[in-house]
Image (spheres, grey):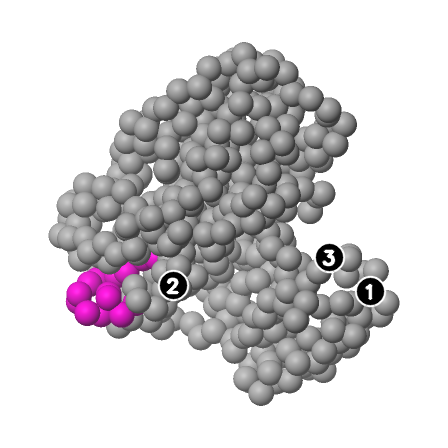
Amino acid sequence: MGKYFGTDGIRAVAGEFPLVNDFIHKLGYVSLVKLQEYAKGTHLKPQVILACDSRISGPSILEALEKGIRASGVDAISIGIAPTPAVAYLVKKTGSLCGIVISASHNPAEFNGIKFFTNHGTKLPEDLENAIEQAIDKLSTVPAPKGTFSVKEEWVKEYEQFLMSTVDASLLKGTKVVLDCANGASYKVAANVFAGLGMNVTVTAAKPDGTNINKNVGALHTEFMQQLTVKEKAFIGFSFDGDADRVIASDEQGRQLDGDNIIASSALCMKKEGTLNHNKAVLTIMANLGCINYLKENGVEVELTTVGDKYVAEALERGNLSIGGETSGHIIFPRFANTGDGILSALQFLQFVKKSGLPVSWFHDQWQKYPCKLKAIPVTSKPPLETLDGFLPAVAEIEKSMNGKGRVVVRYSGTEPKLRILVEGQETAMVDRVMKEVEDLYATKTEVCK
């Protein structure tokens, strides 16, 4: 992680540094200067596609950002409130220089963020992020705007048409589906796409008011969606996060299927069809051991990356692979897109299930999750874990006490001031013991906010 960029762009409480007008203005200018250098020699349109999720802070951030962008001589085009992957798609479709999304994804409404896409529809490489950070720190003033600003919300329809083109409508027609739109960026698009494919759709959390995004709904709070799936006697339910780049599902019995479930099921269906390149899938270090073992037992090799869908995307491209993603529901199907797309992933998974002729519950029951605990500890700072005297060796010793029947992953969040501790093991009591030991160990090594 850099000085300003985390695992997925820049993120903070809106109105607090770095999400203040002066910094955002400089970011818009510097990022486009650097992105023009990055794309030198290509024949791209000198324009940037912009979108926001539904947060109340979005318009003011957009105003500061687009003025900075136009100062670089590039045109800024807003498509309004739209899913993050819509920007990734439209950047490639229109031959634009880059795309920028104003969103804090799954975070509460008081947060916001700025994430970038290259002309390939991929997240920025770290060396480019570093170059932008260094240039911002050296910049004193931003030139006057030269480019134009326009709004083209109708472009989102092209993204909807693309999503519908990725599946066989005749296979999905009449399927009863529940959609939880998190009061976020998918509140129109998801309903339009699923209904446009002839499905029987029940939509919830699709009334954003600027402050209710992700509030007890969405991919981090799927309980209501799961209950509604049962109540409506639906075939399946889906919850998207605030910017719709991740998805969590429910079977007809109201049981959750997270990213691991969706990836594992999809990978094995692709293997059966002969479309799983190299019989290999990409997961992150946060993937459940039960999922990893299940895939291996069924002839699918697993590559593990660090957390962040851009690292998954890099591994997929490097290995020419067909599917990868995160437990959280960021899932990438490179055949269609270079970044996580919740609506696209929901459609692909649903199509695999419908082709099988089996209920969603069958896929839920194919493997058992290892007991797992994930704890997020607020921190005042993020000193590198290797600099904390004896911390990582002590964690390794604690993990060793699990006798090969579990694991411990400790890392800082890339988007929030938190330390994340993941403990998995075959027995719940073991997981509880190890979690307390690691948590207590960290508390003795550094200052923790209470």
In the picture of the structure, the residue carrying the numbered disc 3 is: 382
Q: Please name the amino acid that badge 3 sits on.
A: Lys
Q: In which quarter of the image is the C terminus?
A: bottom right
Using the image, determine if residue 275 lies above or below residue 22.
below
Q: Is residue 353 left or right of residue 282?
A: left
Among the two numbered marks 2 and 1 on one chain, the one whose residue lies closer to the N terminus: 2
Q: Which of 345 and 128 is in front in this view?
A: 128
- Marks 1 and 3, how far apart at CA: 10 Å
- Marks 2 and 1, how far apart at CA: 36 Å
Q: Do the residues labelled 2 and 1 touch (CB within 8 Å)?
A: no
Q: What stretch is highlighted in magenta?
A: 226-239
Total marks placed: 3
On the image, the x and y values in percent for residue 385 come to 77, 61
Nearest to viewer (mark 1 / mark 3): 3
Q: Please name the amino acid that badge 1 sits on.
A: Leu
On the image, the x and y values in percent for residue 178 come to 24, 58
Among the two numbered marks 3 and 2 on one chain, the one whose residue lies closer to the N terminus: 2
Q: Which mark is residue 388?
A: 1
Quick check: can you spot residue 409?
A: no
Q: Please name the amino acid that badge 2 sits on.
A: Asn
Q: Which mark is residue 216?
A: 2
Q: Nearer the viewer, residue 84 or 283?
A: 84
Identify the element where label 3 is drawn: loop
Among the two numbered marks 1 and 3 on one chain, the one whose residue lies closer to the N terminus: 3
Quadrant of the image occupied by residue 413: bottom right
Nearest to viewer (mark 2 / mark 1): 2
Q: How crowded is mark 3: few (under 14 residues within 10 Å), some or many (20 or more)?
A: some
Identify the element where label 2 is drawn: loop
